[in-house]
Image (tube, coloured by chain):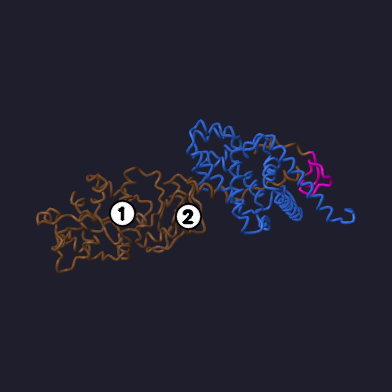
Chain colours: A blue, B brown
Amino acid sequence: MARHATIPPVAVLLETMDDDELAARLAHDLDGTFEALVLTHQDRLYSVAVRLLGDARDAEEVAQDAFVRAYQALATWDAARIREVRLRAWLASIVVNLARNRRRNAADLRPPAALERLLEPGLQPAAGPRQAPEAAALHADAAREWTERLGRCPATLRAAVVLRHVDGLSYEEIAEALGRPVGTVKAQVHRGLANLRAQLEAERGAERPELTT
Amino acid sequence: MSRIQRPLSRASRTNPLDPPAGDAPSAIEAALAGLVSPAPATLAPAVLVEVGLADAWATLPSPLGEILVAWNGRGLSAISLPVDPAAFEEHFVADHRRPLHRSAAVPPSLRRLIERRLAGDRRATVPLDLRGATDFEQAVWRKTLEIPHGEIRPYGWVAAEIGRPAAVRAVGTALGHNPIPLVVPCHRVVRSDGLLGNYSMGGPENKRRILQVEGLDPDALEAAARAGIRYVGSDTTHIVCLPTCHNARRITAAHRVAFRGLRDATAAGYRPCRACRPAGSAAA
């Protein structure tokens, strides 16, 4: 297709480009490198947005908006500042802020669990390369349940847990992304996991009521 | 994507998303790590279009029938008669050095602005993405945007108005390369001898058609030009205009005075209209 004729280096660069190299190239040639940034970070930003918002369409809009804001910011920065940016934490912070605002705006308008949309074709979580359809459906059900559990976590804990365990950020990166001290972030991840564990226990208790008394 | 910070998955269970048998933190963590979803294929193209590193295109109705419209987050970037979409994309990519994606429809806000503009509403400011054009081309196109719906100006008028009175031929070339015809109304710029001249968007016949849609009579305009009439004045106000100026068209037949040259008009005591500024066209 035509796009490969005009921007040939991207596919090649993607094989090898880590964030340091991306930042160096962005500083040198923002327009020529930005697509590589999007392709490198789109799955993680989208995943974070989906688990924070619980809605695939909202998540796509938030991830899209996050990249647009990132571009607009980078376009005003000088090269030195671009080279120093820690892309993973910075992009995560943009998504978390946009997701927080969207949830706040949407809070009064509709219930949080519009999760059926996650099951639309093409929107299921990655289910492994060779899963049978039933396995994929089970996987999608499980993913939805986990997203619902995350949705029942308090927002501050949810953001910390999602960045740590869905996105795989370090505590230092999460602290930077959320603008909170490392110690606070560690405690919030811990409390978030405890919240999820408590939910699991409660669910199991509800399934087997004879064991709860 | 690097996941160096993630704790190694200790569980070798069949599916990490199954509710864990035990409540060990590692099982919950493994389930959460399995929640990475691939971004929809529409995400990256939408981002690139929004920041102006790619464009989208769709069709719109126009006075010339269906047209192809390309845009990005910075503005409208191209308009073309309906040609083979593959040819349009190929042309666009060659001209603009950006990828072009097919879209279902022009965004409603942009569509409304284009429709209002084509209907003659000069308050409708359509954002234009003119990156890649020279300063001279941009000056010519932006000046052309000022020509009101239903009026025409000679190439020499545009040249004089942008401060390059000798660049009449270059103005013609720049208008021939106008990437956004109809919205940038190059059909309203005509030869300095008053004949309508050529048109980049489908030839002279289309130029006549659009001017007709805008309420002008192409045959009458050319007949007057052939008769040597370049300017029209009013013997009550003693103001001289270009023939299609809205002030000139208000002059009643009894008070209408035709001039071959602006010098004739000024010699007869007429001053140039401040709306159509006919002095510019006299330089050519």
Amino acid type at circle 1 is Glu
Q: Secondary structure at mark 2?
A: strand
Which image quadrant is residue A17 in? top right
Is residue B20 within the magenta segment? yes
x, y percent for residue B203: 32, 58
Q: Are the numbered discs 1 and 2 placed on the same chain, yes or no?
A: yes
Q: Secondary structure at mark 1?
A: loop
Along the polypeptide, which appears first: circle 1 or circle 2?
A: 2
Along the viewing direction, whichever of B97 and A177 lies nearer the viewer: A177
**Dominant secondary structure (helix, strand or loop) of the stretch shown in magenta:** loop
x, y percent for residue A121: 66, 56
Along the viewing direction, whichever of A161 and B159 lies nearer the viewer: A161
Quick one: label 2, few (<14), some, or many (20+) residues within 10 Å? Answer: many
- Please give the name of the residue rendered at 27% of the width and 65% of the height, measured from the top-left corner: B216
- Please give the name of the residue rendered at 16% of the width and 62% of the height, measured from the top-left corner: B234
Quick one: label 1, few (<14), some, or many (20+) residues within 10 Å? Answer: few
Left or right: residue B75 compared with residue A67: left
For label 1, the residue is B146
Q: Which stretch appears magenta?
A: B10-27
Chain hosting mark 1: B
For label 2, the residue is B57
Left or right: residue B95 compared with residue B214: right
Amino acid type at circle 2 is Trp
Left or right: residue A188 compared with residue A178: right
Which image quadrant is residue A174 in? top right
Disc 1/disc 2 C-alpha distance (Å): 26 Å
Chain hosting mark 2: B
